[in-house]
Image (cartoon, rainbow, N blue to C red):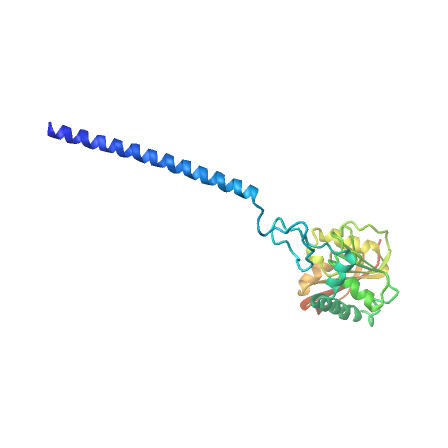
Amino acid sequence: FLVDNAIDTKLFLVSVMERHIQMFLKRLSYVSITIGTITFILLLLKTPDTCVAPDSPPKPHLRFPKSSCDSSPRELLPLHKKNKRLWSTKTWQNKVQSFSNFFRACYPMGLLHNDSKVLCVSAGAGHEVMALNQLGVADVTGIELLDSPPLVSRADPHNLPFFDDVFDLGFSAHFAKALFPNRFVSEMERTVRAGGVCVLVVDECGDEEVREIVDLFTNSSFLGALNVTLTGLRMTRIIMKVQHLP
């Protein structure tokens, strides 16, 4: 009998404790919901301290917004100012100077003249176009999948929007990025006149790799290959003379 009473007493105490715990959890839940609701309402009613007042004076020194409610958005520079800023950087000038040195070496070989019509395929941002212009070559066309006006126009290197035999010299320093090397080369050959040249600059390579690239040119003869330095990188220059063989 005593044992049964003891068991009943324990069960009763456990039941009482469970009810108290449930009541406590319910109260805690109600308090949390109340605090969350009040906080949300305060956030809706109160303007964050980081916001700029509508009547505040302009702040030209703010280049980027400090918060989502900052009333001073980033200034959009016109194209000529954007280019001026880019072209004045040391990195840009060094690359242009490197291309200038590269093309200057083409003059004594008779590959390039100031009156040459030059096509720069996959010209990127246009370093080579600017270098040629600074050397005195006025008729330079740069194309890339993404344009960079005024130096580079938008066009597909695998489907050049030019007539046959238009250019005296075709140049590319990004042949390695071509999705279809055969098509890339054939389009360069097509747009360069007979007697003109195609000049490719690729990552430094040996005779076997040079031969593989040369074999892609079906209407040109191989003039030579030479290891050079361009934009601080060791590369190989490959020169092909276009013949438009039948």
Q: Please, which residue is most extreme toward the left here? A: 1
Give x and y (percent) for residue 114: 87, 67
Depth check: give the residue in front, 148 or 16: 16
Give x and y (percent) for residue 177: 69, 55
Whether residue 198 is situated above or below residue 5 in the rendered picture = below
Give x and y (percent) for residue 15: 26, 31
Q: Residue at x 76, y 69 (%)?
A: 102
Q: Please, which residue is most extreme toward the top here? A: 1
Residue 171 picture quarter: bottom right
Give x and y (percent) for residue 40: 52, 41
Q: Please, which residue is most extreme toward the bottom here? A: 108
Whether residue 90 is situated above or below residue 31 in the rendered picture = below
Depth check: give the residue in front, 162 or 71: 71
Whether residue 223 is situated above or below residue 64 in the rendered picture = below
Residue 104 picture quarter: bottom right
Q: Please, which residue is most extreme toward the right here? A: 115
Whether residue 28 is situated above or below residue 189 in the rendered picture = above
Instruction: Please state if 84 lies on the left or on the right of 23 as rendered.
Output: right
Depth check: give the residue in front, 49 or 16: 49
Labels in figure, total? 0
Depth check: give the residue in front, 71 or 178: 71
Instruction: Please state if 56 lies on the left or on the right of 9 as rendered.
Output: right
Quarter of the image for the N terminus: give it. top left
Instruction: Please state if 168 lies on the left or on the right of 232 as rendered.
Output: right
